[in-house]
Amino acid sequence: MRETILVIDDEESICQSLKAILSEEGYQVLVAGSGEEAVCIVEEETPQLVLLDIWLPGMDGLETLKAIKKINPQILVIIMSGHGTIETAVKATKLGAFDFIEKPLSLDKIIILVNNALSLVRLTEENILLKQKVSHQYELTGNSPVITELKEMISIVAPTNAWILIMGENGTGKELVARSIHHLSLRSHRDLVEVNCAAIPEELIESELFGHEKGAFTGATEKKRGKFDLAHEGTIFLDEVADMSLKAQAKILRILQEKKFERVGGNKLIDMDVRVLAASNRDLEEEMKAGRFRQDLYYRLHVIPLIVPPLRERKEDIKPLADRFILDFTMKEGIEQKVLTDDAIDLLMKHDWPGNVRELKNIIERLIILTPSNEITANDIPPLNIKEYSEIAFGNRALTGDSLKDAKMDFEKQFILKKLEEHEGNISKTAEAIGLERSNLHKKLKSLKVITKGDS
């Protein structure tokens, strides 16, 4: 889309000269002979840049500048004047003018000034989009009562230094909650250091968390900073904290109590200033009762608890979540955006989503890749669990045969017959729809003793 420049001058010859030269540069140029006319154009067209004569009949240049900035403060305005004075330039700058150029105009200077101004406009727009994109990464999607309540809690606790325990099933978005808290916190200018507690072997836990000195053990060829060191003055996120051994939990507890640590192989105490966020998909109270989680560590972490609801408790968020995943994935892959039809949304709403938001995200990305049309319908959505496979393939009909092999053949036969019916017997289209080569589908039909009319 071409950028739009508005030229405001009561001298028609100047308007036409500037329109001609700037049009040659590839810009769309509008002209106005008065401030009043210019204000009407700005309200309708929203130009990116205005070249404004300071001396105008009726509403003068400074008044016009004020009016333009009131309508849209983002529009850049370059003042033109044949009677330029420092005082006028200062007034215009205070009112928000981008720059000031004297008449008679040098067309070369005008082009340079315009290009510089519009480069700034483009840079500003890119920064706004980047900030929106960054903020978008930390947003919880949905407006259900449970997610709205969670968002409100995050907005309250994030600006504090309180330690927070985030609980919820796998795939609900506990990591996203942690990132959102850090993004809104007073420590957002420092790092959020993530620790997957389940992935660190017990013998390496001290080295990973506290770091080690060179030569501390075999293979320690250089000094290494640990996770707590890297998180100094920032935030550390202990994900799946219940998956640590009791020995590892004791080491974590000690550093959280003393707020000091030593690197492995070192003897210097290092001060620690971190905010701690922890997460678990387990019921920590049950884990304590079973002796698998330390009670003192639980109460150290359990300052403010946040519960991330499962997707089955916020099904009204399925559509906005799906729309977001479609937008994110198509933009990332540079492909045309697709839409979910109402019947597709209705089908997604019937599923209980044991894998929660992560499962929904994976299904949406799969549908975008495998659906040839720009519309994703209910027919494009595969069965999401064993019960649905059974209902689609057999309905209330009894299975034939006694063996697993016979049941599998019966399922395949009914499934392929259904797909053939959907595609009016067209072998090529059916093969494409179910992900088989045309020749392989012919072989499958022959082995299942399915008779077709051929490839129409």
Image (cartoon, rainbow, N blue to C red):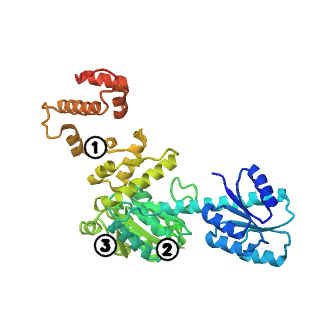
- Is disc 3 placed on a helix, strand or loop? helix
Number of the front mark, 1 or 2: 1
Amino acid beneath label 1: Pro
Tag 1 residue: 383
Q: Earlier in the sequence, mark 1 or mark 3?
A: 3
Q: Residues within 10 Å of mark 2 (few under 14, many from 20)?
A: some
Q: Earlier in the sequence, mark 3 or mark 2?
A: 2
Number of the front mark, 3 or 2: 3
Rendering quarter of residue 109: bottom right
Of the pair 61 and 123, the residue shown nearer to us: 61
Rendering quarter of residue 60: bottom right
**Residue 86 in view (yes/no):** yes
Amino acid beneath label 3: Gln
Amino acid beneath label 2: Lys
- Is disc 1 placed on a helix, strand or loop? loop
Of the pair 3 and 121, the residue shown nearer to us: 3
Q: Residues within 10 Å of mark 1 (few under 14, many from 20)?
A: some
| Numbered badge on residue 53 | none
Q: Earlier in the sequence, mark 1 or mark 2?
A: 2
Q: Is residue 361 left or right of residue 15?
A: left
198 versus 420 height, above or below: below
Q: Is residue 38 left or right of residue 169?
A: right
Tag 2 residue: 260
Pinpoint residue 170: horizontal percent, then vertical percent: 34, 57
Q: Is residue 66 left or right of residue 362?
A: right
Tag 3 residue: 295
